[in-house]
Image (cartoon, rainbow, N blue to C red):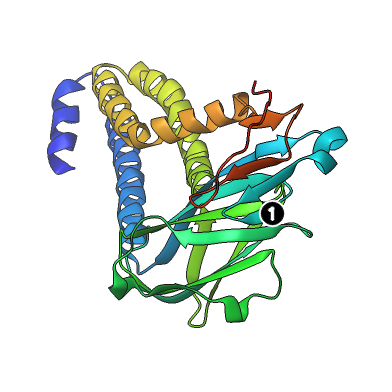
Amino acid sequence: MESFAGVVEAAGGGLSEFQQNLVVAVVGTVVGVLGTVAIEHVKMRREPMKRLTWEAEVQNAMVSTDDAIRRRLRLSYNGTTIDGLSSIEFRVENTGNRVVKDERLRFRLPTGTQIIEAVPTSAPEREMGVARRPDLEQDTGEAVFTIAQLERGQTLALRLSVSSPDISGWKVVAHNDEGDVEFHERSAARRKQDREHVPAFFTLAFLLITVPPLVSLLGDAGRLAAVVLGVAFLIGAAPHIAPTGRTLRDFLTTRPAPSQDVHIGRVESSTFAIGDSSSAATTSYDQP
């Protein structure tokens, strides 16, 4: 800062001592604030944190029928009679900086649904200790999995096949006896983190637009200080640009609802079978 004060004094020969001191004070304050914010940001990222982030792809009515023909048609999945077929592709990742042990995931489906299959699809190593726990499930609409250990960056993928044409309203509940484990949906967690960048971005953008022009009115030294401040504000705002852009995009756009995969509108036989151990009889169906 002393070297910058010397530059200001050399460049601002026409400025009074008060003006030179004002320029140095403004630049020093801005640099100090930006440095403090950067240090706090790094400190927060290094603090111990247990966090699980999940995402899911839900397919409603992969196979469905009209009410008028439901009594004439029997749907089966690997030999199990079903009313319809929907699925959940679930993925959870340890995005924290600490190992997570003895985590329990409970999937709860709407009343009247039946989970006909719930299996890992990511071939987890046995050291992860992934297991389904039927003894902890209270009805056919629940599936409970336990994870003995999930290291940093490790992921687990599960698939739930459900006998129902609609599973809207399903949820997953996480539990850990030790506690202090954050559990967020990936899109929700990202949106929350992105929103935290918005105030800082607009504050720095406002300062970039207003402060340098005002400082430049102080003469040659002021114009030099304005350049320094402008660069500092740009550097400070750079990490906030992408998150703010995603926040605005999410606010302005909506995600279209998924369409049905197969809808049976007419039938001339009595069976439509799905699964590894099933075979389909001669069936006529409409597929959009």
The answer to which image quadrant residue 122 occupies is bottom left
Neighbour class for label 1 at 10 Å: few (<14), some, many (≥20)? some
Residue 68 in picture, x, y percent from top left: 87, 34
Q: Which of 200 and 283 lies nearest the eye of the viewer?
A: 283
Residue 208 visible in the picture: yes
Q: Quadrant of residue 235?
A: top left
Left or right? Give the position of 248 relative to 35: right
Q: Is residue 178 above or below residue 131?
A: below
Q: Amino acid at mark 1?
A: Thr
Residue 126 rendering spot, x and y as whole percentages: 30, 72
Foreground pick, 226 / 206 = 206
Q: Split into 4 quadrants, where in the image is the N terminus? A: top left
In-front residue for pair 174/19: 174
Q: Quadrant of residue 2?
A: top left
> What residue sits 30% from the left and 67% below the top?
151
Residue 165 visible to an observer of this rendering: no
Q: Can you give x and y, in whole percent of width and height, for residue 13 in the image?
A: 19, 21
Residue at position x 71%, y 37% from top? Answer: 64
> Which residue is pictured at 13% across the width and 25% down the height?
10
In the picture of the structure, the residue carrying the numbered disc 1 is 81
Residue 37 in percent (x, y) is at 36, 49
Q: Is residue 274 left or right of residue 8?
A: right
